[in-house]
Image: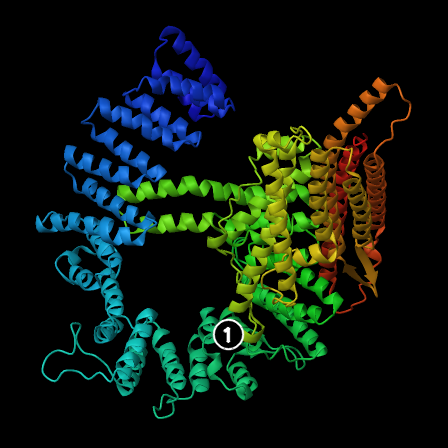
């Protein structure tokens, strides 16, 4: 066992063998040997050994534990349940084995069996937790039940009765048990009863979370629309802590609900269960004013009361009755707020919510007013006034962010914008002095200046200023050099490099972000969207693997979390874990990565290192199966991961999200159908006796061609929907969701090529079933298809011609669309070759039959059917075309290598010396990345050329 722990698996196997020589029936040694075998990649031997021991139904703890470990490593948790079922039969009173059995069921989600195992445990050892494990398993059955009615009428009422029994017998001990009772009542929509539980004696056990009872009461009051109680409770809690924002929201919601219902407090008795109720605007205004007065006496400044006042003004304006209540002018209130909290980084995000209270005409005046109160010092007369300490720097940063948010920078001319960029960078570099003692992992205080400067330059780039984008990269690389942990710099660099078509620097940037766990789903799209489409095949494989590893391990990990939740009685977390697992399983990104990964593997391997048939078999792909949950697809992308200070009308909107999801889903459908069509090619293999139709149906091959024809119709429909979608000409914000590759796929002609290739498959199949004798028409049709395919592929190649990087007026301009077209060309030619090898497999037997006939008849000239010449011409033309593309790529490589970036007159004298250094780095990275892309594409095409040469019948 020590050897296994230290990872020395070979020694472990040897030691186990020694032991087994002496005691050949030592179960535990066999299992430990099996673990060693499993870890050295001999899965089959390990499995055989393990089953040998399992068949003996061991009951010693060591063997059971070791087998559990082995099965877990084999990803076969269902075998653990069998193991403990047997053990429990032999040792019926073992608490330990029963609880292991319960956990084994939990791993595979067998809720009904968990319920039974929990009760069996409780009978052996009447401990409360075991009883409630059983209750929780009932709730799990209700959650997983497809039929909602069943869960409301059977599972939940049964769970409720089980808990009530314990309540009546006064056996409730732990907080978790009360939580569970509350959860059942809430799911049964018995809110009144749930409220009684929380407010009653049982509720006293709810102590582990702050305000747990109050929060639960509040939730129930809201469900029951008991606004007086909501209001009184919120009021009471705000008197205790006037900085708790959620209760201000409830307080306002309930006040206005009560006003709308014209509620009046009863004359004699209490206002409500929770005490005094405020039901008029005057009371609300006074209450907030009192909170502000109280705050001024507090030892530390609280933001809540001041923001609550702004929130109240906003709500009153919304109701059209602000001016009657003298709450003050929002502009003045925000100014006062800035004076009090301007040196805190949260000041900007606090005020951001309320800027729409300012009239647009006041924006510039408001910003000037804020600037006037910041202590800035100018060294000389015409110099920029700079902050003397970090507080002043934070205040100034807050104002700059607000200026951007209010659209003041957007309205400027190009010259003004450039001047602002200069000033921001000057402030950025000056601010670095305050962060000299910062650790590598800490951000510099002035980083936002640099980011805002880049945002301004991005505006200029979008307005057609080509040099601006290079300056963006330069400033970001400089920023990153000073603040190597700044994720915003890295994310923005990733987006801009990708927009320019350079993927190479992105891999390193992304891995330095050190994305954890769920982030592979939320920000993984930044990587997977561009890797393959820019020709970095190796990096694309790797980035897909990162993501897939996370999605696959999620299944296993979630089971472990659920088991821990049972052990520690954190029942309310269990449904959350299940929802989390489902959310990841139906993730859009997961489906995309799965599909693209398989297409990529086929592109790199099928008919190169292994046959197409083997590749498809190893992925267990089949054209009939579709494993994408189209109805439940969840868009888990974080589209706001990049900071933006844009005004609402320029920022990413809900509409953008909806459209982006629609576009991603359409593109995924096209890709998934393409993959399934390719996976159908080997199934059409040669098992046909021509013209013997009964035989065909038996062999099931005719149904295979039907599958392919059906998929082809679906592909046509998906392409039509895609084209309709693109007619809307949607423009996402520059930092919003990246568009898919769909537009390029249609415009460069790849789509038409790929579809006609699959139609060709259908024709060849027909030729195969009808034989060569009377199929002149089909042969001609196939011949024409070959011709038009070559023309289309040549067109596609023409759309790849041109310089990838050119120098215009001293600036670089990249053409990523040419690169994307080249990648599509490689993919399309690969599909063409897979289809050709299918044609080859059909025509070869025909040819050998003809030659046999020729020998029999001893005639020198049996007329060769035209389809053979058509095919030979087609293959020869494919070969020539591919050679031409390879030559073109060699040419591109030479041009890229010869590009002397040093000669780029960095004539922009605005660039300082240290910036020039970064500009060189950036341009070098882009050049090297394009060079790398072109090399990888060239290598792959050479391999494809070799496969074409083999296609000579």
Could you tell whether 820 is left or right of 738 in the image?
A: right
In the orientation shown, which residue stands out farthest toward the top?
22
Residue 662 percent across, percent down from the top left: 56, 60
Q: In terms of image quadrants, where is residue 116?
A: top left
Which quadrant of the figure contains the C terminus? top right
Residue 653 seen in the figure: no
What is the image's colouring?
rainbow
Find residue 856 and report its image quarter.
top right
Residue positioned most to the bottom? 324
Depth check, front residue: 42 or 312: 42
Mark 1 closeness class: few <14, some 14–19, many ≥20 residues within 10 Å = many
Taking the spot 69% from the left edge, 60% from the top edge, the residue there is 474
Where residue 826 appears, as percent x and y from the top left, is 74, 44
Q: Position of residue 625 (x, y in %)?
A: 53, 41
> Which residue lies under the disc numbered 1?
395
Tell me what residue is drawn at x 23 percent, y 35 percent: 117
Point out residue 6 in the picture as x, y percentages from the top left corner.
Answer: 45, 25
Q: How many marks?
A: 1
78 vs 738: above or below: above
- Return the residue nearer the eye: 801 or 836: 836
Quarter assignment of residue 231 = bottom left
Q: Is residue 146 above or below residue 80?
A: below
**Res. 405 in view:** yes
Compared across the picture, whether 43 is left or right of 219 comes to right
Q: For this rendering, which residue is in front, 630 or 898?
A: 630
């Amino acid at each position: 066992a020590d050897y296994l722990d230290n990872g020395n698996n070979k020694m472990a196997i040897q030691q186990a063998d020694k032991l087994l020589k002496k005691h050949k029936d030592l179960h535990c040694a066999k299992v430990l040997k099996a673990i060693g075998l499993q870890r050295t990649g001999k899965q089959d031997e390990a499995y055989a050994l393990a089953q040998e021991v399992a068949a003996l139904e061991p009951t010693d703890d060591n063997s059971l534990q070791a087998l559990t470990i082995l099965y877990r490593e084999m990803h076969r948790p269902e075998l653990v349940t069998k193991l403990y079922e047997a053990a429990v039969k032999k040792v019926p009173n073992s608490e330990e084995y029963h609880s292991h059995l319960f956990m084994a069921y939990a791993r595979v989600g067998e809720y009904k069996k968990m319920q039974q195992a929990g009760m069996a445990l409780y009978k052996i050892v009447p401990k409360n937790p075991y009883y409630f494990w059983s209750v929780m398993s009932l709730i799990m059955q209700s959650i997983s039940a497809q039929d909602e009615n069943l869960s409301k009428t059977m599972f939940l009422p049964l769970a409720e009765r089980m808990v009530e029994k314990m309540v009546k017998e006064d056996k409730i001990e732990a907080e978790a048990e009360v939580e569970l009772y509350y959860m059942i009542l809430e799911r049964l929509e018995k809110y009144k009863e749930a409220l009684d539980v929380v407010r009653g004696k049982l509720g006293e056990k709810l102590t582990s979370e702050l305000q747990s009872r109050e929060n639960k009461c509040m939730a129930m009051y809201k469900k029951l629309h008991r606004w007086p109680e909501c209001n009184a409770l919120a009021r009471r809690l705000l008197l205790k802590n006037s900085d708790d924002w959620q209760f201000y929201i409830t307080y306002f919601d309930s006040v206005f609900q009560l006003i709308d219902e014209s509620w009046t407090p009863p004359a004699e008795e209490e206002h409500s269960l929770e005490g005094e109720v405020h039901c008029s605007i005057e009371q609300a205004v006074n209450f907030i004013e009192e909170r502000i007065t109280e705050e001024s006496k507090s030892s530390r400044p609280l933001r809540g009361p001041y923001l609550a006042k702004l929130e109240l003004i906003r709500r009153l304006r919304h109701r059209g009755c602000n001016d009657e209540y003298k709450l003050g002018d929002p502009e003045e209130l925000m100014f006062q707020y800035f004076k009090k909290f301007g040196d805190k980084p949260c000041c900007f995000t606090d005020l951001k919510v309320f800027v729409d209270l300012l009239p647009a005409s006041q924006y510039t005046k408001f910003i000037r007013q804020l600037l006037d109160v910041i202590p800035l010092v100018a060294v000389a007369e015409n110099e920029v006034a700079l902050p003397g300490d970090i507080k002043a720097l934070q205040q100034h940063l807050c104002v700059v962010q607000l200026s951007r948010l209010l659209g003041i920078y957007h309205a400027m001319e190009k010259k003004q914008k450039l001047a602002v960029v200069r000033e921001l960078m000057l402030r950025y570099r000056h601010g670095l002095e305050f962060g000299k003692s910062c650790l590598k992992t800490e951000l510099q205080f002035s980083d936002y200046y640099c980011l805002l400067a880049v945002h301004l330059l991005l505006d200029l780039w979008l307005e057609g200023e080509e040099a601006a984008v290079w300056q963006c990269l330069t400033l970001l690389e400089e920023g990153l050099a000073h603040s190597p942990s700044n994720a915003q710099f890295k994310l923005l660099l990733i987006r801009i490099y990708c927009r320019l078509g350079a993927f190479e620097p992105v891999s390193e940037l992304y891995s330095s972000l050190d994305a954890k766990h769920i982030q592979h789903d939320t920000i993984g799209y930044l990587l997977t969207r561009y890797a393959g489409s820019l020709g970095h095949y190796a990096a694309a494989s790797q980035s897909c693997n990162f993501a897939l590893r996370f999605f696959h391990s999620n299944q296993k990990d979630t089971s472990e979390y659920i088991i821990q939740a049972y052990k520690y009685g954190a029942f309310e977390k269990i449904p959350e874990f299940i929802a989390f697992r489902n959310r990841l399983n139906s993730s859009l990104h997961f489906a995309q990565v799965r599909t693209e990964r398989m297409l990529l593997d086929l592109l790199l391997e099928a008919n190169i290192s292994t046959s197409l048939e083997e590749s498809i078999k190893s992925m267990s792909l089949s054209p009939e199966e579709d494993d994408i949950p189209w109805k439940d697809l969840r868009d888990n992308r974080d589209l706001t991961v990049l900071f933006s200070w844009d005004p609402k009308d320029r920022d990413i909107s809900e509409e953008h999200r909806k459209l982006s999801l629609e576009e991603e889903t359409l593109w995924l459908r096209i890709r998934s159908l393409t993959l399934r069509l390719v996976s159908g090619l080997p199934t059409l293999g040669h098992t046909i006796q021509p013209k013997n139709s009964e035989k065909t149906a038996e062999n099931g091959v005719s149904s295979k061609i039907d599958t392919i024809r059906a998929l082809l119709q679906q592909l046509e429909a998906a392409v039509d929907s895609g084209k309709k979608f693109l007619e809307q000409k949607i423009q996402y914000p520059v930092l919003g969701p990246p568009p898919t590759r769909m537009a390029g796929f249609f415009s460069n002609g790849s789509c038409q090529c790929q579809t006609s290739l699959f139609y060709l498959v259908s024709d060849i199949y027909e030729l195969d079933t009808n034989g060569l004798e009377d199929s002149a028409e089909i042969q001609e049709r196939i011949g024409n298809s070959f011709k038009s395919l070559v023309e289309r592929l040549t067109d596609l190649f023409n759309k790849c011609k041109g310089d990838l990087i050119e120098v215009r007026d001293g600036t670089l301009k990249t053409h990523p669309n040419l690169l994307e077209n080249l990648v599509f060309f490689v993919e399309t030619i690969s599909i063409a070759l897979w289809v050709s090898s299918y044609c080859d497999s059909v025509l070869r037997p025909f040819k050998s039959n003809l030659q046999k006939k020729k020998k029999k008849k001893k005639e020198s000239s049996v007329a060769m059917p035209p389809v053979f010449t058509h095919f030979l011409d087609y293959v020869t033309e494919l070969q020539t075309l591919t050679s031409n593309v390879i030559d073109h790529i060699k040419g591109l490589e030479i041009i890229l290598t010869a590009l002397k970036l040093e000669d780029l007159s960095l004539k922009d004298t605005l660039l300082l010396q240290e910036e020039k250094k970064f500009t060189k780095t950036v341009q070098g990275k882009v050049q090297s990345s394009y060079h790398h892309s072109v090399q990888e594409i060239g290598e792959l095409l050479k391999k494809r050329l070799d496969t074409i040469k083999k296609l000579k019948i």
